[in-house]
Amino acid sequence: MSKAFGFVEYGGPETQEFLDRPVPDPGPGMLLVAVRAAGVNPADWKKRRGLFGTGGELPVVMGTEASGVVLSVGAGVTGFTPGDQVFGIAPAGAFAEHTLLAARTTARKPVGVGFAQAAALPVAGAAAYGGLEQLGLRAGQTLLVLGISGGVGTAAAQIARARGLRVIGTASASSAAYVRTLGATPVDYKGPVADLVAAAAPEGVDGLLDLVGGDALRAAAPALRDGGRLVSTVDRDGAAALGGGYLAWDPRGTVLAGLADLVAAGELDPHISATYPLAHAAEAMAEIESGHARGKLILEMS
């Protein structure tokens, strides 16, 4: 049996508990992995609360991204063998001692990248990469990131800087110093955001990557110059109403490998703010659900 952490019904933290499940068999296109680390994301508590729907079989093992060591491979899998150190998307849940990774959304972990760093990339890193690809900005242009201090924003700021973009990001006043470490100009999200951004970029911003949505998106939209581009990761309707698009997230293996190469080269730091053992998964979930976590939270398996 394999220990895991998940929820037994949709709702609040009281529905979470530790689970024992059989070690899964890798079907076609899948890899069985002994998990070393798993990323914790806001989507984990949103799924538990049923914000993405309440269909499917319960209980549900939580977590989407994991790193670990391949134990066996399913039919049709090429390019991976037992013993490989890998990271990727875990359709069967990542908060577990063993899980399955989909080969299409898995990459080898470079020697110079730790398991915790690798586990921080498949969701936040790939979302940041995808958003920047959709915006299609050029070196020298200006990017505004709403909610820059979280995992996606942290990755987006660094990838954008590596591409030669100027970056402005909204965050709390207490996070301003952290935002500057990312090479970005902080703007207090509680202020008149459009006016504050205009003071930093009087010509307007060329692209807006929205990680917040709702009123925050509408308040910041006037900072976008004529012809500027908008992509949201959270607010499909709000982005569409403003003439923008919604994130087309595609964490394929080649994207993940490229992100890991940036980490190995020192151009991308996932900024892991805290690591928890699997036994303290509920504490990690409480921190991510508070909305005040900076960078990435990671669960580590013994």
Image (cartoon, rainbow, N blue to C red):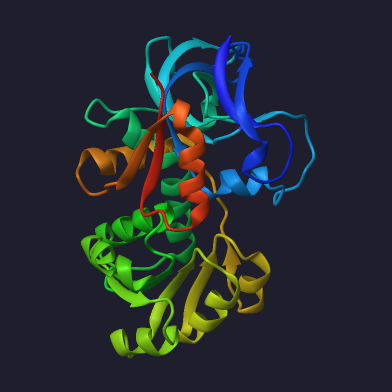
Which one is in front, 64 or 3? 3
Q: Is residue 123 above or below residue 139?
A: above
Outermost residue toward the front? 14
- At 29% from the left and 84% from the top, the residue drawn is 200
* Residue 125, position as x, y percentages in the image: 41, 47
Give residue 166's position: percent from left, percent from top.
Answer: 28, 71
Horizontal and vertical percent for residue 288?
48, 49
> Image point 44% across, 48% down: which residue?
124
Q: How many marks?
A: 0
**Vertical relation: 98 (above or below) 182:** above
Residue 109, image quadrant = top left
Does 53 sit left or right of 247 as displayed? right
Q: Can the viewer see residue 298?
A: yes
* Image quarter in which the C terminus is found: top left
Q: Visible in this render: residue 224?
A: no
Q: Position of residue 132 (x, y in %)?
A: 43, 60
Q: Residue at x 61, y 77 (%)?
A: 243
Q: Residue at coordinates 48% horizontally, 58% vertically from top-left?
A: 291
Between residue 56 and residue 250, name the one nearer to us.
56
Q: Quadrant of residue 156?
A: bottom left
Residue 176, compared with residue 157, is above or below; it is below
Quarter holding the N terminus is: top right
